[in-house]
Image: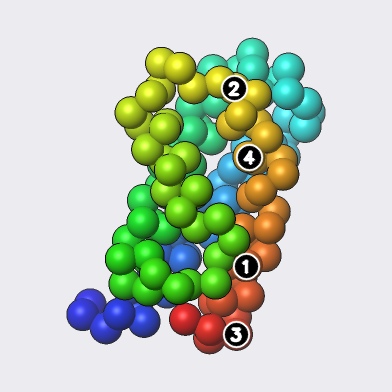
């Protein structure tokens, strides 16, 4: 898999899969912060998927630093925070990312994949 476009497509697919998995966690739970905060399994599942999203974005940026994704660098930074500063990770921040930022990321990734803008 030496083709850079194929690699980017795979990473974008990984990002989309992780977003869809987070959405599936929320399908059978109330979309409320208290539910997220109090459900350790739910939080850990979201955090793990944020790690995957951040790592996939990091690999994408190494191939194409100009990929048109809003806050691409911040996505990688969040991954680093989840992994390396897990003990100071505030659930409010993670929840805010899920509610405010993942919908835009999903839209951008789908657009890149569907319109062959890689």
Disc 4 crowd rating (10 Å Cα; few below 14, some 14-19, many 20+) is some
Q: CA distance from mark 2 to mark 4?
A: 10 Å
Task: Report whether 26 appears left or right of 76.
Answer: right
Q: Where is the N terminus found, in terms of image quarters?
A: bottom left
Front position among marks 4 and 3: 4
Disc 1 crowd rating (10 Å Cα; few below 14, some 14-19, many 20+) is some
* Disc on the earlier residue, 1 or 3: 1
Which residue is at a point 48% across and 27% down the rendered structure image? 44
Which residue is at a point 47% across and 40% down the rendered structure image? 78
Q: Which residue is mark 4?
A: 97
* Disc on the earlier residue, 2 or 4: 2
Q: CA distance from mark 4 to mark 3?
A: 25 Å
Q: CA distance from mark 4 to mark 1?
A: 15 Å
Task: Report whether 63 appears left or right of 86.
Answer: left
Q: Which residue is mark 2?
A: 91
* Disc on the earlier residue, 2 or 3: 2
Element type at mark 1:
helix
Q: Position of residue 25 (x, y in %)?
A: 62, 37
Which residue is at a point 59% across and 22% down the rendered structure image? 91
Q: Which mark is residue 115?
A: 3
**In the depicted structure, whether residue 45 falls above or below residue 77:** above
Element type at mark 4:
helix
Q: Quadrant of residue 16?
A: bottom right
Marks 2 & 3, CB-CB < 8 Å contact: no
Q: CA distance from mark 2 to mark 1?
A: 25 Å
Element type at mark 2:
helix
Q: Which residue is mark 1?
A: 108
- Mark yes or no: residue 68 visible: yes
- Mark yes or no: residue 49 visible: no
Marks 2 & 4, CB-CB < 8 Å contact: no
Disc 3 crowd rating (10 Å Cα; few below 14, some 14-19, many 20+) is few
């Amino acid at each position: 898999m030496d083709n850079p476009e194929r690699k980017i497509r795979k990473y974008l697919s990984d990002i989309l899969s992780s977003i869809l998995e987070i959405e599936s966690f929320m399908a059978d739970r109330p979309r409320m912060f208290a539910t997220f905060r109090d459900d350790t399994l739910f939080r850990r599942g979201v955090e793990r998927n944020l790690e995957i999203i951040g790592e996939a974005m990091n690999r994408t940026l190494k191939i194409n630093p100009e990929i048109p994704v809003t806050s691409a660098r911040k996505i990688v930074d969040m991954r680093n925070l989840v992994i390396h500063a897990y003990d100071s990770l505030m659930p409010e921040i993670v929840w805010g990312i899920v509610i405010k930022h993942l919908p835009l990321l999903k839209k951008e990734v789908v657009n890149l994949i569907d319109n062959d803008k890689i």
